[in-house]
Every structure is written in C-alpha cells, then in structure tokens.
Amino acid sequence: MIRTIKQVFSGQKVLEGAGVKLRRIFGFANPEMFDPFLLFDDFSSTKREDFIKGFPWHPHRGIETITYVLKGDVEHGDSLGNKGVISSGEVQWMTAGSGIIHQEMPIGDTAGTLTGFQLWANLPASHKMMIPRYRSITPTDIPVVKREDRTVIRVVAGSIDGVDGPVDDVIIDPEYMDITVEARVEFTHATHKGYTVFIYCIDGAAEIGETSIEAGQLVLFNDGDIMSLISGSNGVRFLFCSGKPLHESIAWRGPIVMNTDEELDLAFSELHQDTFIKHKI
C-alpha cells in the first residue's frame, strides 16, 4: 500500500542556544505524532550572525541526537572527552543515554554560510540510562547508491537496494538517507508497515499524489509499505527518515526526555547537584 500524506509541516522560526536563529520543523507539540522522533531543526543560514553564538554546554538524557552538516563546520565537545569538528557531509550520531553534557558551536564556511539539520530520536524506557556513546560518521563512511535513473542515495542508517548504512545498532531501527532525484523521475522505497516515515525537502520540489512540496517542507506519511514521489522539473533533494514507534509515555522538559515527571525531576535535581553524569571515560 502506497503511503499517503498525513500532514505537511513548514515549521517556525525559533531562537535556541545562546541565540541561534533556526527553523523548528517539529518538536515539543504532539510528540506522539512523530514517535519515535521528537524534534527536527533546520539550522541553515547564509548569515554568520544567525548561528555564530552557538549552543554552549548543555545536558541531554534519554535521547539520541543526529546532526547532519551539508555545508560549513560545527565545532563540538562533550563530557565523554570527544571533541572535534563536524564538517561538510558528516554526521554526528550521539546517544545521550544516562546523561551527557556537550556543546555545538557552528562556525560555517569561508563565506559565512551553514547548511545543517538536527534530529532527536527517543530512547525506550529500557535504554534511557544506557551508557552514552558518540559516533562520528565521515563522508567516506557513508555508502552511496546510484540507480540507473541517476538517483543518488547516501545511506547513513537503514538499507536500500541491498546497501546498508554504517549505523546499524539503534533501538528504534531507523532509516536515515540523503536522496537526490533527477527531474521528473519517480522514486519509490519499501518501508516497514507500522513505522513512522517522514521526508524533509532540502532543495527542489516534488509531487506526492496530488500534493506539491518544496524546499523547507516536511511530509509526515500515513502508514503503508511503499513511499513514493515524483521529482519536480528541477529535481529534488530530501532527507528520508523512518523509525519504529515506542508507544511509551513521554515526559519532556528542554533537553531531557524521560517517561515520567518523577524521572524528569530526578534528572534536573542531579544536574543541580553535579551528579548528573553517570558514566565517564
């Protein structure tokens, strides 16, 4: 069954971190709608002043954050001792688990521009307090699938055309792909029935059924086992994401996502008492 459109989102402008201007496509409102995903931000800008103040040290617990940079650099560091730069074409897949404190400081490219996205994925109650981990995925780590119709697919997580992405041991069984389709070409991909599926249009336009979508829009699909679209006259580039819903209660306050308010209160109490970090290297 072909997946139909459930809802189209264009997001809203928000100010985050120390003063970063970004577009929040979804997040905080109705988290059950995107289960197991929680939030999706587009922090792209052609003005350095929009992002240079960055996201100074802040905590996370109970989630995973997936940061994908297409253009520019983002400096980062965390309480596990990891530090470095997320550069063009790289992905940072961070599992906060029991607790991590990190910072992300965008610096852009030489022209002062930045293109990037961050997705939050929830962890089930059984893994909320798992040992944190961090994975840096470079462009050479990401396999590229090229179809005969010149469709190009960068596979970060999941599988397509028999090719598996490097991220393969995440609880929600995600798919995360960067897909470019030439003009007026139909793209189809088999999806797991019952999984949450959405795409985010990065560039160009496409038609899904009788609905046209363009850059900056996100499409959340109804259930089905096939996702399909037809690219526009100038082609389309989009992120494809899917994951297995957790169907668990969500207690969410800022950067921490747990299952109950009591767990949230404990997390923030530990943060104030400097006992938040449970695992160190």
Image: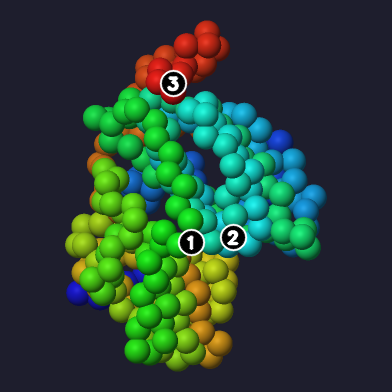
Q: On the image, numbered disc 2 is attached to which residue?
A: 88
* Mark 1: amino acid: Pro
Q: Mark 1–mark 3 contact, CB under 8 Å?
A: no
Binning the other alpha carbons within 10 Å of mark 3 as few (below 14), some (14 to 19) or many (20 upward) gives few
Q: Earlier in the sequence, mark 1 or mark 3?
A: 1
Q: Mark 1–mark 2 contact, CB under 8 Å?
A: yes
Residue 268 in the image: x percent, y percent?
A: 49, 17
Considering the numbered disc 1 on the image, is that residue within a helix, a strand or a loop?
A: helix
Residue drawn where x is 49% and y is 89% of the image? 183
User: Where on the picture, by quarter, is residue 249?
Assistant: top left
Binning the other alpha carbons within 10 Å of mark 1 as few (below 14), some (14 to 19) or many (20 upward) gives some
Considering the numbered disc 2 on the image, is that residue within a helix, a strand or a loop?
A: loop
* Mark 2: amino acid: Ser
Label 2 to label 3: alpha-carbon separation: 29 Å
Q: On the image, numbered disc 3 is attached to which residue?
A: 280
Residue 116 position (above or below residue 99): below
* Mark 3: amino acid: Lys
Considering the numbered disc 3 on the image, is that residue within a helix, a strand or a loop?
A: loop
